[in-house]
Amino acid sequence: MNLWNERFSTDDYVFGTEPAQALVKLEQYLIPNGETLVIADGEGRNSVYLASRGFKVTASDSSPVANGKARALAASRNVEVDYKVEDVFDTDWSAKQYDNVVGIFFQFVPPAKIKEVLTGLRAATKKGGTLLIHGYTPEQITFATGGPKNAAHMYTKQMFVDLFDDMEILVNDEYQIYLSEGSGHKGQSALIDFVARK
């Protein structure tokens, strides 16, 4: 994970300090004021936003450098977030359940582990809780405006239908828009929003 420490070792916030556009749009589906887990939170833009909206937020990322920047952002916005340095591959997802589980642009997961991580997020979601995932579709490769270079790291509607067939799917949309979220996500992008209730 040294790569992520290196990437985040800049004074700038690589993905900006404002929340992902998709999170603002999909917030209506989250359990209001609920205990909320934000995984692979990076520099904190999404966890800080949710905390400012009254959610009780726990956020994790594998990069201590990103974690430090997230803490600084939370302090500057006067919000409290329980930050943890944690690797998604070493997490016991069944240890605690949350009202909301949020995963945004965590597309470093190798294709062979995607199913394991996504079903882990389901296990971390309480009965009646909401799982929200946002990321890139394979078409993102042609835009090259963010995300991995390998289409096998991306998500599709069918992948979510297959993995979460025991949940009530509320949103499962693929679309293309222009993103401007820091220097890390800038330009025309192929995206997917997924929201389900357990």
Image (spheres, helix red, strand yellow):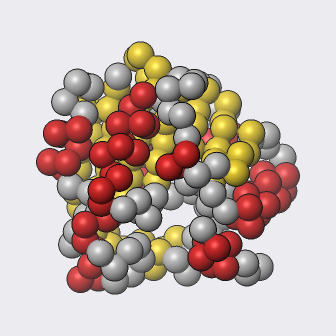
Q: Where is residue 112 drawn, in percent x and y?
A: 30, 56
Query: The N terminus appears in which quarter of the rendering?
Result: bottom right
- Picture quadrant where residue 165 is located: top left
**Residue closest to the eye, 188 or 10:** 10
Q: Where is residue 192 drawn, in percent x and y?
A: 29, 56
Residue at 40% from the left image edge and 17% from the top image edge? 128
Q: What is the number of callouts on the image?
A: 0
Q: Where is residue 97 drawn, in percent x and y?
A: 53, 23
Res. 80 in view: yes
Above or below residue 17? Residue 95 is: above
**Residue closest to the eye, 3 or 131:** 3
Above or below residue 58? Residue 127 is: above
Res. 23 in view: no
Image-based side of 164 in relation to 9, left or right? left
Residue at 64% from the left image edge and 32% from the top image edge? 55
Image-based side of 8 in relation to 194, left or right? right
Residue at 52% from the left image edge and 71% from the top image edge? 181
- Picture quadrant where residue 169 is located: top left
Query: The C terminus appears in which quarter of the rendering?
Result: top left
Residue at 79% from the left image edge and 43% from the top image edge? 79
Above or below residue 183? Residue 85 is: above
Q: Where is residue 78 drawn, in percent x and y?
A: 84, 46
User: Residue pushed farthest top?
Assistant: 127
Above or below residue 2? Residue 46 is: above
Image-based side of 82 in relation to 189, left or right? right
